[in-house]
Image (cartoon, grey):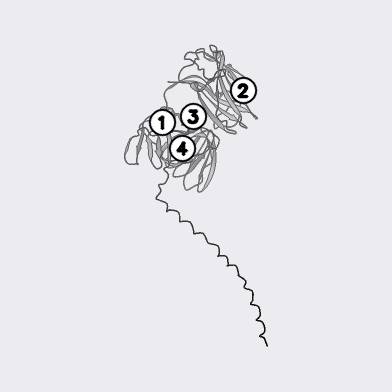
Amino acid sequence: PPAPPSPPAPERREEAAPEPPPRTPAPPPPPPAPGPTQPARAFLAVARLEGTVEIGDGKSWKKAPALPEWDLGVSLRAGERPARIVLAGGAALTLRSRARIRAAGASPPELFLDEGEVFCDVPPAPGRRFALRTRDALVRVTGTQFAVKEGDVTEVLVAAGEVVVSNDRGEARVAAGMGLAVRRSAAPGKPRAVDVDRALAWKMLARPPETVRLRFSFEDGRRPAPFDGGRVVPGPPRGLNRFCLEGTPGLHFDLRRADAGTAARPGLRVRFRYFAEKGGAIWVQLFNARAGDNFRYDVPHVAAGAWEAVEAPLEEFYRLADRSSALLAGDPLTWFNIAVSGEGRFYFDDVEIVEVQ
């Protein structure tokens, strides 16, 4: 019989090749090792030196040259007479004879008083900080005028604004017209009323001579005849001061009744103290007949709740109608006023016009 047919060959099915596993990307090369870096140099920027300022290491001293940058740790001292260091930020340091001070910090500015007495004028400004250290204490301010004397104890006197004096044992707030003494081994003492102007009379030796054209302190309890507006009151306390002039919404002063010779001269300055309960704005105006207009100075920052001091040089006054115009030497000044704007009351004291030589 014929052979049975062979069974059909199984159908061959081709399988797809397996997909290769995903490739892991090669790791990035490591960053290069950082090279050696130099620490940022810290210093206090100096605007100018006035009088004899010496630079040294505490053992030997020489006259300081022009000093635009005051490196941290470097000591400066006054010569035989008081001298001034004006920082670029506006703060001014008046060193009494042979007082020695060094830069300790740059941001914010911090100084260390090693010996003697220094008067610090730190104009108020938003966010401003400033500190001065001694062996006994730290004095912190945001804008004020104060003096620190280093000796057997640290003495602090405040002429304007307020400072905080502290050490490891405690702290105390010292307002204008007050002072205190502190030792490292004890908390700061209780502030006491002092005659700050008399105690700090020495600092005027570091400034050019000046002639007082007019000055009113209101200590006799009466309003001087040239003033129109305001009333004499005890006002906010300021050391031994008894009276001041409450001047809201401002003060007016007829210069012709006070000094017929008041005229624009180089070096003429207006000074006064103020206390603003809630801050606001203060501006000073001088009227000149030749220009037929007021020349105005705006107080840059009006602090609230403390006695502050203002010094307005005549060259910083601007004409209201035309800011490019200026007073000419010899222009008669016939009217003077201080105007205010803001909530709360304003008080003024020690109003004066002086001519700096």
Q: Residues within 10 Å of mark 4 (few under 14, many from 20)?
A: many
Residue furthest toward the front?
A: 1
- What is the CA distance from the residue labelled 2 to the residue labelled 3? 25 Å
Numbered circle sitting on residue 250: 2
Q: Earlier in the sequence, mark 2 or mark 3?
A: 3
Q: Which residue is mark 1?
A: 48
Q: Which residue type carries mark 1?
A: Arg
Q: Which residue type carries mark 2?
A: Gly
Toward the viewer: 14 or 239?
A: 14
Toward the viewer: 90 or 165?
A: 90
Q: Is residue 234 visible?
A: no
Numbered circle sitting on residue 201: none
Q: Earlier in the sequence, mark 2 or mark 1?
A: 1
- What is the CA distance from the residue labelled 2 to the residue labelled 4? 34 Å
Q: Which residue type carries mark 4?
A: Val
Q: Which residue is mark 4?
A: 148
Q: Which residue type carries mark 3?
A: Asp
- Secondary structure beneath disc 4? strand
Toward the viewer: 128 or 353?
A: 128
Residue at point 46%, 31% (across, down): 200
Toward the viewer: 346 or 219?
A: 346
Q: Position of residue 237 (x, y in %)?
A: 58, 32
Asked if residue 130 is positioned above or below residue 340 in the image, the reply reads: below
Q: CB under 8 Å between callouts 2 and 1? A: no
- What is the CA distance from the residue labelled 3 to the residue labelled 4? 14 Å
Residue at point 53%, 46% (across, down): 170
- Secondary structure beneath disc 1? strand
Q: Earlier in the sequence, mark 3 or mark 4?
A: 4
Query: Which quadrant of the rendered structure holds the C terminus?
Result: top left
Q: Nearer the viewer, mark 1 or mark 4?
A: 1
Q: Is residue 137 visible?
A: yes
- What is the CA distance from the residue labelled 2 to the residue labelled 1? 36 Å
